Structure formats: structure tokens, C-alpha cells
Image (spheres, rainbow, N blue to C red):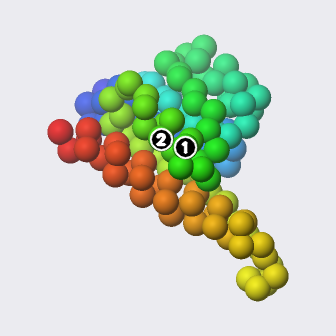
Amino acid sequence: MSSNFISKYGNWALITGATSGIGAELTSQIAAKGINVVLVARKEKELAEHAISIEERYGVKTISADLSTNERVKKVTQISKKIGLLVLAAGLEVNGAFEKNSIEKELQTIQLNVVATLALTHHFSKGMVE
């Protein structure tokens, strides 16, 4: 089963939001199938701790990046690994009455949940199509 997964997706997967919740769980499941993982998260300490727990068994590369900024999205696109599986689990929500929320927080949410997702998908899909 693992060899089928690797033949379908290749040797490397990139996972955003990799240190908690759905991202952390998918990281573990993908790595268990034998695919090396590139972990992307904004909190460096948690990223390093999560990488250590996985790298004893699987290939791991980490990128500390807050994807709510264009600069950090570009940092992620600079990796040299051929990504065959892209898991975009990073996300942000703003709660409360819209008119009372800061516009900066709303724009940050759009940047992370929409713009970063679109930019990363566009960038890595080119290699996947090939």
C-alpha cells in the first residue's frame, strides 16, 4: 500500500499548518506511508519539536513561515524538493461581529486562507502536472 502511495505522489509532500490539528495528523499519516515531508508552520519551537518526532523514522525538512504575508509564501515556493502531494491545512478565523473586527485581522485571514492557498497551489501544481 505504501509503495502505491509513493508511486502516485512521489517522494515529497508539503504540509502547511503542520504542527497542530488536522495538519499534524495528516503529517503523521503521510510520513507513515513513507513519503518525506516538508513541514510549514509559523511557530519555530513547535515546528522543531514536531520534526524531531517524525525525523527519527522519515525524511523531514522544515520551513518556519507565517503564510499571512506574501514574503513568507514566496519563501515556501523556494524549496528545492519536487512536491507531489500538497496539504494546505494552515488556516485562520476571525470571530465576532464583522463591523467590530479590525480590518487588518480580516485581511490577514483572507491572505492566509485564500491568497496563500491559491499561490501555493498554483506554484506546486506545475510540477505535479509534469
Q: Is residue 40 left or right of residue 105?
A: left
Q: Residue at x 49, y 60 (%)?
A: 115
- The one of 28 and 89 positioned closer to us in this rendering: 89
User: Helix, strand, or loop for circle 1?
Assistant: helix
Dividing the picture into quadrants, the one containing residue 2 is top left
- The one of 118 and 103 positioned closer to us in this rendering: 103
**Residues marked 2 and 1 touching at CB (< 8 Å):** yes
Three-letter residue code for mark 1: Glu
Neighbor class of circle 1 (other Cα within 10 Å; few <14, some 14-19, many 20+) is few
User: Helix, strand, or loop for circle 2?
Assistant: helix
Tell me the CA gap for discs 2 and 1: 5 Å
Question: Which label number is shown at residue 71?
Answer: 1
Dividing the picture into quadrants, the one containing residue 1 is top left
The answer to whether residue 50 of the structure is visible from this angle is: yes
Can you give x and y, in whole percent of width and height, for residue 24 in the image? 63, 40
Q: Residue at x 63, y 33 (%)?
A: 64
- The one of 40 and 36 positioned closer to us in this rendering: 40
39 is higher (above) or lower (below) than 124: above
- The one of 79 and 40 positioned closer to us in this rendering: 79
Can you give x and y, in whole percent of width and height, for residue 49 in the image? 73, 25
Mark 2 sits on what residue? 74
Q: Is residue 45 left or right of residue 120?
A: right
The answer to whether residue 35 of the structure is visible from this angle is: no
Neighbor class of circle 2 (other Cα within 10 Å; few <14, some 14-19, many 20+) is some
Q: Residue at x 17, y 39 (%)?
A: 130
Can you give x and y, in whole percent of width and height, for residue 55 in the image? 58, 18
Q: Residue at x 33, y 37 (%)?
A: 84
Can you give x and y, in whole percent of width and height, for residue 121 in the image? 38, 51
Q: Residue furthest left?
A: 130
Three-letter residue code for mark 2: Lys
64 is higher (above) or lower (below) than 106: above
